[in-house]
Amino acid sequence: MILALAAALAIVVQDHTPLRSAAQSGATELTTLWQGDVLEVRGERAGYLQVYNYRRERAGYLRSEAVRPLGLTPGDAPELLAVLRFLRDSRGSEALGISYGAAYIKAVPAQALTAEPLEAMARMAERLADSASGSGDPAVDVGAHLDVVAQLGIHMRSFERNGRMQVCYDGELFHRVLMLPRASPEERALAALSLTRPDCIDPALVPAPRAALDLERGAALDGIAERELTPLTRSRLHARRAAVWASIAFAQAHHGGPATAAGQRALTELLSVHPSELGEDRKVEYTDAIVRVSASRWASAIAARQPQSLTLSAAPGDAGQTCVSLRSPRVSAGALTQRCSYGVPWLASAQVIAQGQAVVLAVQPLEGWRELWIFHKKAGAWIVEVVPPGINDPELGYIEYAGYVPATRRLLVALEVKERGHFRRTFEELRLDDLVTIRQASSPDLLRDFGRWQDANWRRETLALH
């Protein structure tokens, strides 16, 4: 006989909970329930509850120890908040924590709602998305947990990045934190950092929407007051601003506008970071910012007067392209050579080397990616060769000219690249004739020629020595 109960709710606290057709362990399993699933309790029999699951639109029986009663009155709010605080940092329990958070928001009076539960739920949603992208415990059934939180209004975006799927929380609760007057500066700063994550930008976004998005990201970060922030959060904020303003500088230059102010802002923000305050877990954000700012570093530079022996000039090419031409006053029959790109050629970086036998130029085809163009003679004719910072599914990177060794005709270059989630920084010697790498090391101190022949301007301006 089933005992009649007043209408009540319960929340599933165990994964792989079977919903059966009868109050027996051997009864047919109708479906599997997961932590965070909310049920309506309709009765009880011999240690089993008769329940109805609205997400699956299915009734059945389950063991009573697999659920906890769920109250939604103002009197239940303190207990719900205590559970939410406990689950907030428990990896693998994000779906359960989000369900308790939703119950708390339902129970607490509107005038008593603070940013804390919203921020906690958003943080768990973000962590669940990261797990779905491959950074979580493989033993946790992330797909099932995503289905559970979807019924609570937690939505995800997904796109392909470098051959794998990236899942990101859409950030609705973080937006609510930013708009809540009672949110603390720390809560607002953490929300802004989550909303401006570079890895949650769809790589398929075309230039105009991407530029608009970067301006929105910059405005969100600039709206955060630095007072009352912890040292860790303050440095994270400066690093993220640096990365965003580097992207803005590239977009402005790409559209033919002035990028000096944005480029200088990126450098200023980067120099405001105190790496020692970030800790091991957050230093990757600093490295990410360094690579992005390095890619756009020449935006803040003023072009020096080029020597009369060899000059580079840029002119519009086919739709969206910029063509760079190498000319010499000794040759009146047009350009010695020319190459076109859809990116930004930073003419301020142009430098004649090898006793006038070569010219190097930094060219940025993409946000967060800078190549080195080398104009040089081969078999008596001028050619242009491109040296990228990496070739194995790179995500970010830059390569820059660091010096020249006359006796061996070798270029000194520094590069930093992010490949498959890991940053790699190297210093190399390239043979000018064929651009083959002769030597490389993780530090310039390990290469003898770097000590004697490195370019003084590079040493003064580079970010590669961080």
Image: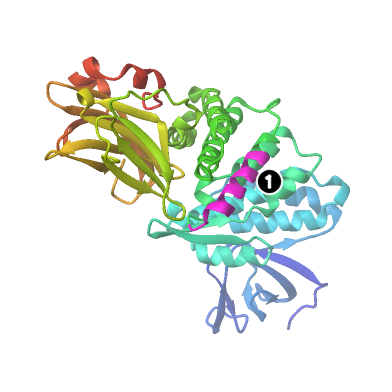
Q: Residue at x 22, y 29 (%)?
A: 411
Q: Residue at x 61, y 49 (%)?
A: 213
Image quadrant where one finds the C terminus: top left
Q: Position of residue 234 (x, y in %)?
A: 61, 28
Task: Say left or right for 314 vs 43.
Answer: left
For disc 1, the marked residue is 119
Splitting the image into 4 quarters, where does residue 399 fall? Answer: top left
Q: Is residue 92 visible?
A: no
Q: Residue at x 74, y 81 (%)?
A: 2
Task: Say left or right for 122 vs 419.
Answer: right
Q: Position of residue 20 (x, y in %)?
A: 59, 80
Q: Is residue 221 above or below residue 158?
A: above
Q: Is residue 105 visible?
A: yes
Is 118 in front, or is 57? Answer: 118
Start-end of magenta stretch: 204-220
Q: Residue at x 80, y 60 (%)?
A: 72
Disc 1 residue crowd, few under 14, some 14–19, many 20+, Cα 10 Å: many
Image quadrant where one finds the N terminus: bottom right
